[in-house]
Image (tube, rainbow, N blue to C red):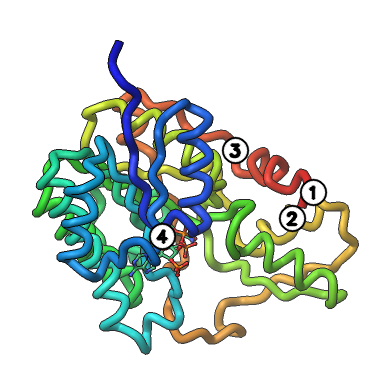
Amino acid sequence: MSRPLVVAVTGANGQLGQDVMHALKKRGLQGIPLTRAKVDIVDQAQVMSTFLKLKPDVIIHTAAYTQVDQAESERDLAYQVNAYGARNVACAAAAISAKLIHLSTDYVFDGRANKPYDEYTRVRPVNVYGASKRVGEELVTQCHNKTFIVRTSWVFGKHGSNFVKTMLRLAKSQSELKVVHDQIGSPTYTADLADRLMDMLHTECYGVYHITNSGHCSWYEFACAIMEEKGLQVKVRSVPTSQFPRPARRPSYSVLEGMAMRLQGFAPLRPWREALRDMLQGE
Ligand SMILES: NC(=O)c1ccc[n+]([C@@H]2O[C@H](COP(=O)([O-])OP(=O)(O)OC[C@H]3O[C@@H](n4cnc5c(N)ncnc54)[C@H](OP(=O)(O)O)[C@@H]3O)[C@@H](O)[C@H]2O)c1
């Protein structure tokens, strides 16, 4: 009988990383959690020596610099982590011939489309975070060929901070919430995404994938759904993005089409609203 796969997870304390660790356990796979304290992905020598020692079969690289607004004033740091840090992980994966699942983002697109972006649409990031993640995608594929690039969007889950938790927190202290209606995307539940990564890691179907929960909405509609699911009587008012100036520009439309998933035989994720209901149980 073949031994269970050993899977190392970077960013193991992050919101996706924690659910990836749970999913591995559920599937009976051996997960090695790598936090920043264990390995700083910016340190190339440390990354290489860590993976040469651990020799996992698969690396799921969720660690990233994810502060979209702050990235505008911390460009070098965003690139250190999202571009060169990802490269460091990919070089180490190549050295031990491990499969690599590298997480990326809908923010590689400019948001001018009016239909979902498939995996082969030309990228054109409109902010520093998106640009740094795009360079990460390029460097990773240059360094290692056993690579899955998984772009996801509007991530929410039980761990860490995210839009759902922010809305619930604000609903405790405010009777009205203003939320933008002119940014459209697909919310994605960390537990559902992690589950699909488990299907993927057993295959050799390398390439770029878009994985989100099914359907799409605006942030305003997402906020309304959160209030409805929790039965909260807070008024949600829709406002244009222009009323919420932020340091980083956001794509106004970043719905991702899961063409590669469909063509490679991976099941689509359930509708985002069902996933939201699940996540809110116990919140
Ligand atoms: N959140 C979203 O809405 C979203 C949307 C699309 C794509 N994504 C992508 O999905 C992936 C997971 O995102 P997430 O929401 O789970 O992010 P997260 O909660 O911010 O977690 C990121 C993790 O990366 C770690 N990290 C940062 N710099 C590091 C370094 N130099 N060395 C080692 N670890 C480092 C952080 O550690 P510390 O806790 O020590 O800081 C943190 O645990 C990322 O690739 C992200 O770009 C996220």
Q: Residue at x 67, y 60 (%)?
A: 164
Using the rendered view, name the quadrant where residue 219 is placed.
bottom right
- Left or right? Give the position of 199 relative to 177: left
Q: Secondary structure at mark 2?
A: helix
Visible residue check, residue 55: yes
The N terminus lies in quadrant: top left
- Kind of residue indicated by mark 2: Ile
Tell me the residue that label 1 is attached to: 229
Q: Earlier in the sequence, mark 3 or mark 2?
A: 2
Disc 3 crowd, CA 10 A, few/some/many (<14, 14-19, 20+): some
| Numbered badge on residue 271 | 3
Disc 2 crowd, CA 10 A, few/some/many (<14, 14-19, 20+): many
> Do labels 2 and 4 touch, CB within 8 Å?
no
Q: Earlier in the sequence, mark 2 or mark 4?
A: 4
- Left or right? Give the position of 258 relative to 268: left
Using the rendered view, name the quadrant where residue 240 is placed.
bottom right
- Kind of residue indicated by mark 3: Pro
